[in-house]
Image: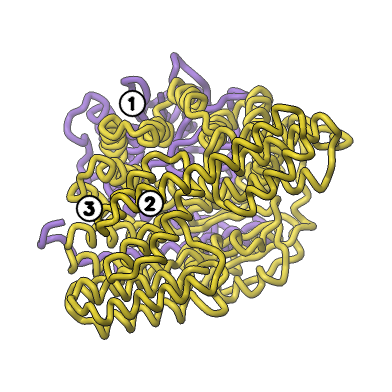
Amino acid sequence: MDDSAPSQDLLLFLASTAHDMKNSISVLSGTLERLLVDASPRGEASYPQMAQMLYQTRRLNDNLMQLLALYKRVGTPEYPFDVQPIETAQLLDQVVALGQVLLDAKGIALEVDAAPDLIWHLDEDLIVGVVSHAVNNAVHYTRDRIRLSLREQDGLLEIAVEDNGAGYPQALLDAGAAGLSGVASGIDFRTNSAGLGLYFSREVARMHRHRGREGSVRLENGGALGGGCFILSLP
Amino acid sequence: MSAVLPAKAEPIDWAGKNYLVVDDFIGVRQLLRESLRSLGARNIDQAASGGEAMGLLAKIRYDVVLCDFNLGDGKNGQQVLEEARVRNLLLPSSVWMMVSAEKSVESVMGAAEHQPDAYLVKPITEGVLLTRLNRAWHRKQVFRPIDQAYADKDYLRAARLCDEQIEASKVHEVELLRMKARLMEKSGEPEKAREAYERVLAQREYQWARAGLAKIRLANGEFEQARQMFQGVIAENRYYIDAYDQLALAWQGMGKLEEACSILERAAKLSPNSVQRQRNLGQVCLKLGNVGMAEKAFRKCIAVGEYSVRRTPDAYLGLARVCGLKNEPKEALAWLQAAQREFGGSNGDLHPDIDLRAKITEGLVYHESGDYRRARKAGDELEALLGVRAERPDTATCLEMATLLFAVGVKEAPSELLCYLIRNNHDNALLLDEVQAIFDKARLTDEGGDLIRSSKKEAADLMNQGVLLWKTGKLKEAVDWMREARARLPNNQRILFNAAQVLVSHMRERGYDEALALEAHEVLAHVDRLQPGQQRFAQLMAQLAELAPKPETPAPAVDTSA
């Protein structure tokens, strides 16, 4: 470590502050979920605002998780990457459970279509994080439906999150395409607020390598529901 | 919320279980309690610190423990887990979930002996918690018969059970192969361990499997090949700390202490809170004469061990050596007193030789600083300590002690110690050479040679007579003879193995006998403590298990298909 690196004390302080923030956000989002479950959509005027608060809390949490992981530079590899064989059905169980309260509160229907009995080698925490983030994004873009699907395609695990909204804006599609063709990061962080999430997802996908292939993320419009379509492929 | 989750084939009753939630942040404790309550849980205890958790764990057997890794001052979550396991405060079926704000290096580095059943990253939501709890529970079912055979030290049966379970549960295949490889290593069957690792690698490039192959090379003395493989693992994943520790051993095997030291230093930077790593670093530094770095490592070793069941007197003895080399004998003595205070007396069970080891270090410190009068005095006191006890410490300590005693001018006690070592290791050529070298250095070449020969013959005669009785079918006499041989040479592995072999033969010919079976188990447990991982140990344990009367129903393979 060279002398210009931040001192060990400062790093410890930053890490413990980040941990504190995560604790607070966990409590905040947990409490909101509980309030929403107990409240009825018609009975309380504040119901939609509470749902919006939960959505924003989730965004905060996603961003913080992504910052923490990227700060350790995912994929270089400084993040302790932890691959295990996972039943993919359980992967989707967790994504669904994470999003359920928010989706119900917002009146959004979720369809799940998963290939049965599939086992894949992946970092479960990272992949649940990426797919949940995609579902949260879809909550923003959709009209009233989201489709979560999972299948094996040409030796790759393909997880898709689709919605029936107006589709991704052109800037984001361009960023996705640029990232795929390998042009820089493809993302302008100053003009694109969704950039961090996409960047994170792509880094996580790339960490998954097997026999010369690596994971990828692509964005499309259209798909099964006619709206935005986020597709994660893992070797 | 749970309505959307697909129904499991075997729903688990989470309501009736006992839970412990450990977190220093009250908001998180309440949140976790609420999540558990929504699973139906009624019995939920809480602890705000590691100390409080230990108090509860000592009183109550919990089915599920949710424990945060960072618990503020005092023990951290990993130390609580280690102590609970070592003190046997957990049921075999207990599920331990380690909770942390982010993925930690420790969770994937692969070395920790006491792994939790799962790691959870905050925020924890009910869906994730339920999925992981169910998974850990099903996994426990799959591994229960294997863990039982493992606890019985019947490693060959445990390995067979692994093979059976691989057929039944595809999702656990990789982990079962990992377990099987470990069992084969413990059974002295490195070739079969290698096969298991290769089967894993045919599926995916798992670093622990690659490191496993390298460890087999290392154990076989192929240091250069092992070095290359460990470096390959580190290049792939610089957080796989276990590979660093092993790489340091490979360097040491090649006699390259500088390289070993620098790799341990890197590992200690990445993951500083390991008692063993800091101790190893200190000891290598000491051998290199790097007093400053040795002192730093030993001090860190004591600091990180403060709340750990793994704390070790080695760091105290090492610091005494450091002080001696810095010509500060008073400070050295203070560290030796601290070692005896911390690890002797009522804590003496784990370290019965602490008084001997402290006295050896004392003599060494005086001898190195040129105070030959005090060094001799320490030598005489050491001789007196030996005189009042029948047991002798491990081989390394005996060699160290004999070397020191000769150096300070004591003659009889070290010769006796070395004869004891030869009698108990009469077929170990390397050790014989080492002992001869110590006699040479003490200018006792011829006398030492005679002593070695007669000690060797004494052990060989004892053994041969036992073998003769056994081969001529005098099983009762053979058993008696080997019992006598064991009493005279309690740590001779060849004799111990033969004693167990004769007991097994006796039961095979003349029927199962509980007392004889117990005796054989005790003999084998002792030899496994002296040197684990021997093929003959695993084979004899399996033969013993076959002789035992069969339980009513053999455990069936568990089907965990959801």
Label 3: chain letter: B
Q: Amino acid at mark 2?
A: Val
From the image, state whether disc 1 or disc 3 is nearer to you.
3
**Residue of label 2:** B105
**Labels 2 and 3: the sequence-earlier one:** 2
Say yes or no: labels 1 and 2 on the same chain.
no
Secondary element under disc 1, as helix, strand or loop, is strand
Q: Is residue A103 left or right of residue B451?
A: right
**Residue of label 3:** B261
Q: Is residue B20 left or right of residue B179?
A: right
Q: Colour of chain B?
A: yellow
Mark 1 vs mark 3, CA separation in Å: 36 Å
The residue lying furthest to the top in this view is: A154
Of all chains in the rendering, the one displayed in purple is A
Using the image as rendered, state which of residue B437 and residue B168 is in the foreground: B437
At which x and y percent is residue B345?
A: 54, 79
Mark 2 vs mark 3, CA separation in Å: 21 Å
At which x and y percent is residue B337?
A: 39, 82
**Residue of label 1:** A214
Q: Quadrant of residue A96?
A: top right
Q: Amino acid at mark 3?
A: Cys
From the image, state whether disc 2 or disc 3 is nearer to you.
3
Q: Amino acid at mark 1?
A: Glu
Mark 1 vs mark 2, CA separation in Å: 23 Å
Q: Which mark is residue A48?
A: none
